[in-house]
Image (spheres, rainbow, N blue to C red):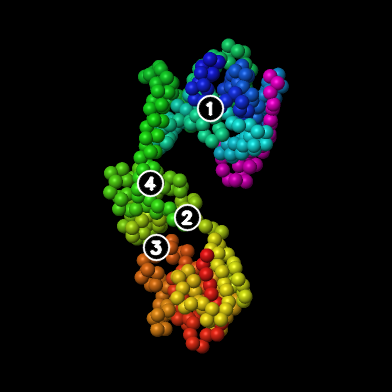
């Protein structure tokens, strides 16, 4: 098995002999086999063990074994204990999810602190097969069929070439000590159910299941590469990204024969799921309809599907004291300058407002528009207009409306920032002093 291990590493080029590898070692058969393979191959490595304190004396026994073997082999040993049950209650999630998060966060801290180049886990070919079957059973796209990735960032899986049976044979031949987790035999866990009942039945159909699966896996990974290239081509063709907002051309998407899959892939990075995609296709004609993921909102606009991040930390308003020069309202920088009327030409870009200083009541207020807002747009001879109607005339989407900043004086809108000032605050012959406000 050592030759297979070395051949696999040479072929995949996971790391070099100069790299320092941190092995994640639970004390079970797979991870202990990995320790001895690394030792026999002469690679530099350290050992990291997490005691999640979930199995009482058994957890402590795992820790003791790994520590003892590290000392025997002369390998650096890192160990940490987690109160996993307490952390799971605090986070209101499962112990399995919490344990995984704690484990990988600690591994990464060790990697950075002790100059390890990679973190190696002992996942093998059967683990990858179980993952694919589990994903296929629950429903998945092509990404769910590629199995456990060989490398993901700094994490590597150097045993993916080996079956569980091959690892077991190696451990027995080398008389490698390890500890068995009794929970691995319980079929109340979905993965164990697949391992102990589904796969044995599949092997009655194909005794060479693992070998066949490995070949299929290579085909699927190649297919995924081609698939991702096509998705990227369409992303370039029918989407754009402007000011932290993602736009998808509706009609171009709807005309595509694989529109459901294409939209699913485009929206996947923003946290939208398959059920929401189906709802979206049912309601794509409802202009103004919105859909939410944990992190993002999607707006059905006239021409585009518009996706933007949720910003729950937005300031609702900010006061502008007299003689303020520069300030930031959320992510928008705003500059105020004060001077005589003759200092500034009356013609200014939409991002600049010239206001009559004498008509302003400080402190001014910066805020976002709200339902019922009215103002007197410059050029309408004092007639008032609902801000909602003003935005509709400009064909602004709901998301664009939500980003429009309002400058207010004593309860009256004096500037719809970036669009129009209010007639009541314009520069006239009677104006002596001007406030110039710029969106930077």
Marks 3,2: beta carbons within 8 A: no
Mark 4, residue position:
235
Alpha carbon separation for disc pair 3 and 2: 15 Å
The residue closer to the viewer here, 49 or 130, is 49
Mark 1, residue position:
14
Mark 2, residue position:
244
Question: Does label 3 or label 2 sit earlier along the sequence?
Answer: 2
Alpha carbon separation for disc pair 1 and 4: 31 Å
Question: Does label 2 or label 4 sit earlier along the sequence?
Answer: 4
Marks 1,4: beta carbons within 8 A: no
**Which stretch appears magenta?**
73-96
Question: Does label 3 or label 1 sit earlier along the sequence?
Answer: 1
Q: Residue at position x 59%, y 78% from top?
A: 362
Residue 396 is labelled as none
> Helix or strand or loop: what does disc 1 sit on?
loop
The residue closer to the viewer here, 26 or 72, is 72
Question: Is 184 within the magenta?
Answer: no
Marks 2,1: beta carbons within 8 A: no
Marks 2,4: beta carbons within 8 A: no
Q: Residue at position x 49%, y 51% from top?
A: 295
Mark 3, residue position:
397
């Amino acid at each position: 098995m050592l030759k297979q291990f070395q051949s696999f590493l040479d072929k995949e080029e996971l790391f070099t002999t100069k790299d320092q590898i941190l092995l994640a070692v639970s004390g079970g058969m797979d991870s202990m086999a990995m320790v001895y393979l690394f030792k026999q191959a002469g690679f530099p490595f350290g050992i990291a063990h997490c005691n999640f304190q979930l199995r009482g004396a058994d957890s402590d026994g795992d820790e003791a074994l790994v520590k003892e073997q590290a000392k025997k082999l002369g390998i650096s040993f890192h160990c940490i204990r987690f109160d996993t049950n307490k952390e799971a209650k605090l986070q209101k999630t499962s112990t399995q999810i919490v344990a995984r998060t704690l484990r990988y966060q600690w591994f990464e801290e060790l990697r950075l602190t002790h100059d390890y180049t990679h973190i190696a886990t002992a996942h093998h070919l059967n683990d990858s097969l179980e993952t694919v079957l589990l994903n296929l059973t629950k429903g998945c796209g092509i990404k769910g069929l590629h199995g456990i990735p060989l490398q993901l960032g700094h994490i590597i899986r150097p045993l993916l070439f080996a079956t569980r049976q091959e690892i077991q044979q190696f451990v027995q031949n080398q008389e490698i000590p390890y500890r068995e987790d009794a929970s691995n035999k319980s079929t109340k866990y979905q993965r164990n159910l697949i391992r102990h009942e589904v796969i044995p039945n599949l092997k009655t159909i194909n005794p060479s299941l693992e070998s066949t699966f490995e070949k299929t896996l290579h085909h699927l990974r190649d297919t995924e590469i081609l698939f991702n290239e096509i998705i990227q081509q369409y992303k370039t063709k029918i989407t754009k990204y402007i000011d932290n907002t993602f736009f998808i051309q509706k009609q171009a998407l709807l005309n595509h024969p694989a529109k459901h899959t294409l939209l699913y892939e485009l929206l996947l990075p923003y946290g939208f799921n398959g059920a929401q995609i189906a709802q979206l296709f049912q309601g794509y004609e409802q202009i103004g309809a919105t859909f939410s993921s944990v992190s993002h909102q999607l707006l059905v606009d006239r021409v585009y599907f518009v996706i933007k991040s949720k910003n729950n930390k937005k300031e609702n308003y900010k006061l502008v004291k007299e003689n303020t020069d520069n300030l930031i309202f959320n992510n928008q920088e705003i500059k105020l300058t004060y001077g005589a009327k003759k200092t500034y030409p009356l013609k200014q870009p939409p991002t600049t407002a010239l206001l009559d200083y004498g008509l302003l009541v400080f402190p001014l207020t910066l805020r976002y528009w709200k339902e019922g807002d009215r103002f007197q747009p410059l050029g309408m001879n004092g007639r008032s207009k609902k801000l909602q109607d003003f935005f509709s005339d400009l064909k602004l989407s709901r998301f664009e409306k939500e980003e429009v900043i309002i400058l207010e004086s004593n309860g009256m809108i004096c500037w719809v920032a970036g669009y129009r000032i209010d007639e009541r605050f314009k520069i006239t012959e009677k104006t002596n002093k001007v406030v110039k406000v710029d969106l930077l």
